[in-house]
Image (tube, rainbow, N blue to C red):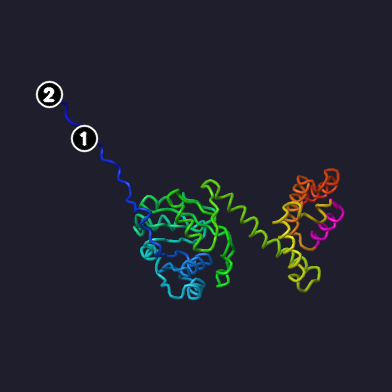
Amino acid sequence: MSAPLRTRPAARRRPATVPFATIPAVLTVGIVGAGRVGATLGAALAAVGHRVVATTGSSGASQARVALLLPTVSRRATAEVARAATDLLLIAVPDDALAGVVAGLAAEGALRPGQVVAHTSGAHGLAVLAPAVAVGVRPLALHPAMTFTGTPDDLSRLSGISYGVTAPAELRPLAARLVADLGGVPEWIGEADRPLYHAALAHGANHLVTLVNEAADRLRDAGVAQPEKVLAPLLRAALENALRLGDDALTGPVARGDAGTVARHLTQLTATAPESVPAYLALARRTADRAMAAGRLRPVDAEPLLGVLDRDQSGVAA
């Protein structure tokens, strides 16, 4: 008697996919998040011939941006935008909201196999798109390394900027094409490196804005009526030199080891704007470290300076 046939367990069904070659040259695009980034990138994609068919945007500010940058694009609910974006759905929402938006769209059945879903978060890679991938979506992280105002001026700033891109191998050609369509250059960032990549950009750009405004405020405290006129040529030169020369661009009392000058700075800041002292101390100490590492500041010359910084740091901590 022959042995009974054993039935094989049913194979786990995988989401259907669409061959890469079927993605058309002209993409049908939807934008979830009509903030500064989403509206600007949507306008840039439309300007090179892609069909931007729908966007979200219920707040007054979002409606104004859509009217300004995407005047022919209809505003719809999030799920409706996702369904209309048959080729590319661009999600441009705050970092902490991204996971919820993706999970919600997947749960509602608003995504379809083969659709490319890209987000513009610098901090996230592809993992945040896992619920979309589970239903057959193709994931893409596409972060423009630029600051945005949400006005037409942003479009002129896109030419030549870098995009932090994380993509599966099969989607890299499309990612490179999208970046080229936007006038940019791709920087391929590994999934695990996304937080470090984003931290570097935030440290350089966002903290720069804070630093410049702190300097302007202290100049006002010193009686300067138009601090921007004093700062503009100085800061432009400092930025250009830093980008060109690195640590060799360092100048000023910390790089020279002028402990007495730094001590007077701290005394005056403590009396006038004590809230600025911790940031000054942290940046001065880091500047000293970099100046020593670059050979710009000899350790023997740094000792009195570091003593001032350590003494004041202890006072701030206390």
Q: Which residues are magenta?
A: 257-271
x 55%, y 47%: residue: 193
Q: Which residue is mark 1?
A: 7
At which x and y percent is residue 231? 75, 67
> Given the image, on which type of amino acid does mark 2 rest?
Met
Q: Is residue 53 left or right of residue 271?
A: left
**Above/below status of 312 relative to 9:** below
At which x and y percent is residue 160? 58, 62
Q: Is residue 151 left or right of residue 222?
A: left
Q: Is 219 included in the stretch rendered in magenta?
A: no
**117 vs 273, nearest the viewer:** 117
Q: What is the secondary structure assignment of the residue under circle 1?
A: loop
Q: Earlier in the sequence, mark 1 or mark 2?
A: 2
> Given the image, on which type of amino acid does mark 1 rest?
Thr
**65 vs 173, nearest the viewer:** 173
Instruction: Look at the magenta stretch and give its main secondary structure.
Output: helix
x 45%, y 57%: residue: 118
Find the residue positioned furthest to the left.
Answer: 1
Q: Is 260 included in the stretch rendered in magenta?
A: yes
x 21%, y 35%: residue: 7
Q: Which residue is mark 2?
A: 1
Q: Residues within 10 Å of mark 2 (few under 14, many from 20)?
A: few
**Above/below status of 63 relative to 102:** below
At which x and y percent is residue 162? 57, 58
From the image, which quarter does the N terminus lie in? top left
